Amino acid sequence: MALNLTRRNFLKTASFAAASVPLSKIVAHAEEGVSKTPLIPQGSFKDTRTVTGGICEMCFWRCQLVGKVRDGALMKIEGNPKSIDNGLSICARGNAGIKLLYDPDRLKYPMKNVGKRGEPKWKRISWEEALDECGKKLKATVDKYGPQGIAMFPHGASAKYPMHYFEHAVGTPNVSEASFFQCRGVRDYAWLSAIGGGPDENVDMANAKVIFALGCHFGENIHVSHTKKYLKGLANGAKLVIVDPRFSASASKAHIWMQIKPGTDTAMVLAMMNYLIENKKYNADYVDEYGEGFDEFKEAISGWTLEKAAKECEVPAAQIKEIADLLAANAPNVSIHPGRFSSWYGNDFQRGRALGCLAGMLGAFGVPGGWVKPKSPGGFGKIKWGHGHHEEVEALHREAEIYHQSPAGTPTDLIRDCAITGNPYPIKSCVVWGQNPIQTIPNQQKTIDMLMQMDFVMCVDVMPTDITMYADILLPEASYLERYDYIKKGTQWDLSAKQQQYISARMPLVEAGFERKDQVYICNELAKRMGNEEAIPVHTIEEMMDKMLQPAGLSIKKLIEENGIHLQPGKDPYGEFPDIIFYNEDLVDEGYSGAPTYVPIPEVPQGYLRLLFGRSPLHSFNRTQNNAWLHAAMPENPVWVNDKTAKQLGLKDGDRISLVNSEGVESGTTSHVMVTPGIRQDCVFMAHGYGTKNAAMTVAKDAGIDDQKLITIIAVDPETGCHGMRNNFVKIVKA
Ligand SMILES: Nc1nc2c(c(=O)[nH]1)N[C@H]1C(S)=C(S)[C@@H](COP(=O)(O)OP(=O)(O)OC[C@H]3O[C@@H](n4cnc5c(=O)[nH]c(N)nc54)[C@H](O)[C@@H]3O)O[C@H]1N2
Ligand SMILES: Nc1nc2c(c(=O)[nH]1)N[C@H]1C(S)=C(S)[C@@H](COP(=O)(O)OP(=O)(O)OC[C@H]3O[C@@H](n4cnc5c(=O)[nH]c(N)nc54)[C@H](O)[C@@H]3O)O[C@H]1N2
Ligand code: SF4
Ligand SMILES: [Mo]
């Protein structure tokens, strides 16, 4: 049965959230309640023309869009009908992109802070003046302290070009991307150590007989083409197994929901693997042909009985057995989902390795339903900055010989420590581009301490999020709807369909408003002022796009003629089988465990609750908080409290509360309690991204509670240096 993914079906999967509010209602309410003057031109849609080639960046999945444009104004965003990725579907956030474009609070002009850092008084200045000041200050830092005197915090498509500038031409190793050290870096390197390649989320859920996921809450986390795979799998009758301490949207659809004790997942996976070995229920043919070090692995996990894991994970042994049997009976056509956000408890590399090994034991690679590497088009032009005049500087963790499995860049906390202590060297300038370190990186005060000791802070953003309060110079970038920047390529989401590949590139749907500029302009002008003019690889953003597209026989012009998406025949995605490194000798040489191993985490202290957090279908982190439509649909983040716990604490549904953590840090802002049996008694849960402090975000300011403010204890993953954030404990305070 093919699934007709109407918007209604799509939103239905987000069963808990306000996502089921029809968009028309959200819009009406938002226009009434929040922004009194409608910013989108009103009137008939009949004179609109369709502009193709848009690529969304309300989150990092980058769905393909078209815009309905009238008199130069964007009236509506839709999925590109030619898309074999997201197709016509875009999520609530994608639809609401129009409210980012026309947000009256958006950055419009270059600004200089003439007040204090953190308590800015903004003065509008010209681009010339702003760039001169940035160039002068950054060059002074390099001259005095060397390139390592600059730290850079990039994220998102537009940050790639400047990131490579600072890494290659300027030569600082102190670059830390949120998607690595606060998100999926630990997963990527764990799977690399197990299957020799990064996993992404390449599980063929559409054709799976069983979908098995730890902590992924599909339907609340939304990446459109990925959600489509999941929904098609369910429509085709796949059994869904969700392991989560919380009754998430996907738990509500699950055949088996295991309400696991937080941080213990690896114990459960080890016990399943040991059970499969002891009962000869694993795929011995696959293991014999592609497995390495299986005997050592088998020996290492042999103590993991179902009972031992059941005790550790506080779940029935029979349920662990039921899941293992279900997977074995349906192998190899099972999706062992590698997860995405993986910086959980500081024992996360081991969980990733265990999942890779489980998929290997089931032979769930290269077959329908398994982990399959899609055959995407290749051969794009590389944009390479020239090497400046700097000496090579070793990254902090390499110098210290720690975190041997670290993703690219430098672990964020090491950069902060180095900046705050001046040891082993001073870090005195900071460039933030498309990242909001205040809400993104745990231990907020430490981030603020780092920023306060800088000689100079420059920030490139689209909105006045909290990080911008710490900028000395704040530069307004053109948004994803107003600029070129990104090649999106791939195969169709349903791998069993007719094989096709696509190539697209982000193109503006409307012209950039006010004085907003693109990243090539901003970065090149900086490079000129920092003495790196000869390292510049391209002169305009259009040249950059054409240079990237040219080896594929494409150009911006050609892509426009093809309605924004070039389609070509694809290749059979099935039939490639990776080696599975069950016991990894390289890890042993680096001082880590060769076989996946379980590391227990700190228990919840008496009188406290573990703070869990995650996505809401209606927001992306903090970046969408000021969006009038999305805010109207979900103005704050309810704090999930178990019904028994609520009774003990004398709390009722809807009570207003604040939180205080075990180190005495207070949330500052308030939210309301959601009483539910759908969360463990020793945990609370809330959506990430709320609790904005900057008064310039007039919609989002003080709405809901900022989880990051309460995350002061970092559980650093010893293999990768990534930052586990869920070993923090809170008390509820009635407001
Ligand atoms: N406590 C806690 N921390 C987390 C998470 C969590 O769940 N809880 N999630 C983690 C995860 S999974 C991730 S991926 C990271 C995300 O971390 P970030 O990427 O830092 O999060 P965003 O809120 O998207 O903030 C990015 C910043 O980019 C700006 N921005 C948006 N579009 C553009 C643009 O086109 N150009 C420029 N220059 N700027 C732009 C936004 O206004 C915002 O200031 O956070 C991680 N940190
Ligand atoms: N709508 C929306 N969609 C998004 C994003 C967004 O901001 N908004 N961001 C995108 C990005 S960058 C990412 S990385 C992904 C993140 O999406 P996911 O990878 O799904 O990550 P989270 O949202 O952090 O997942 C939180 C879930 O993990 C559960 N959990 C907590 N502790 C444990 C544990 O110890 N064991 C288990 N088994 N479960 C646990 C929580 O209860 C919660 O249900 O979402 C992507 N999709
Ligand atoms: S999943 Fe939604 S927010 Fe993310 S890129 Fe696609 S439409 Fe945009
Ligand atoms: Mo992420």
Image (tube, helix red, strand yellow):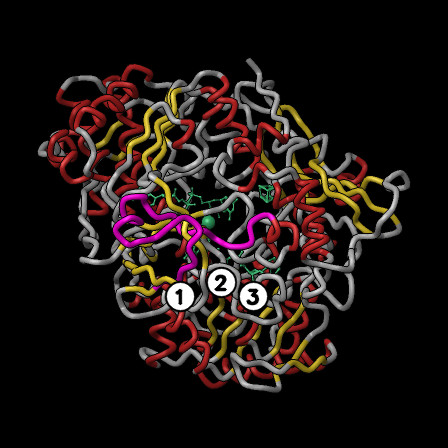
Specify whether residue 142 is in view. yes
Badge 2 is on which residue?
691
Q: Secondary structure at mark 2?
A: loop
- Who is closer to the viewer here, 554 or 361? 361
Specify whether residue 184 is in view. no
Amino acid carrying mark 2 in the image: Gly
What is the span of residues highlighted in magenta in the rendered image? 633-659
Label 2 neighbour load within 10 Å: few <14, some 14-19, many 20+? many
Amino acid carrying mark 3 in the image: Lys
Residue at position x 52%, y 22% in the image: 232
Figure quadrant of the N terminus = top right
Q: Position of residue 295 (x, y in %)?
A: 14, 29
The answer to whether 726 is drawn above or below residue 309 in the figure is below
User: Do the numbered discs 2 and 1 sit on residues whose CB atoms are within 8 Å?
Assistant: yes
Badge 3 is on which residue?
701
Residue at position x 26%, y 65% in the image: 662
Q: Quadrant of ligand 3?
A: top right
Q: Position of residue 31 (x, y in %)?
A: 72, 53
Residue 622, label in figure: none
Q: Is residue 539 left or right of residue 471?
A: right
Amino acid carrying mark 1 in the image: Ser
The Cα atoms of the two marked residues, 3 and 1, are separated by 14 Å
Q: Is residue 364 left or right of residue 12?
A: left
Residue 667, label in figure: 1
Q: Position of residue 417 (x, y in %)?
A: 33, 73
Please check the rendered image and state whether residue 618 is part of the magenta-colored stretch, yes or no.
no
Q: Residue furthest right?
A: 47
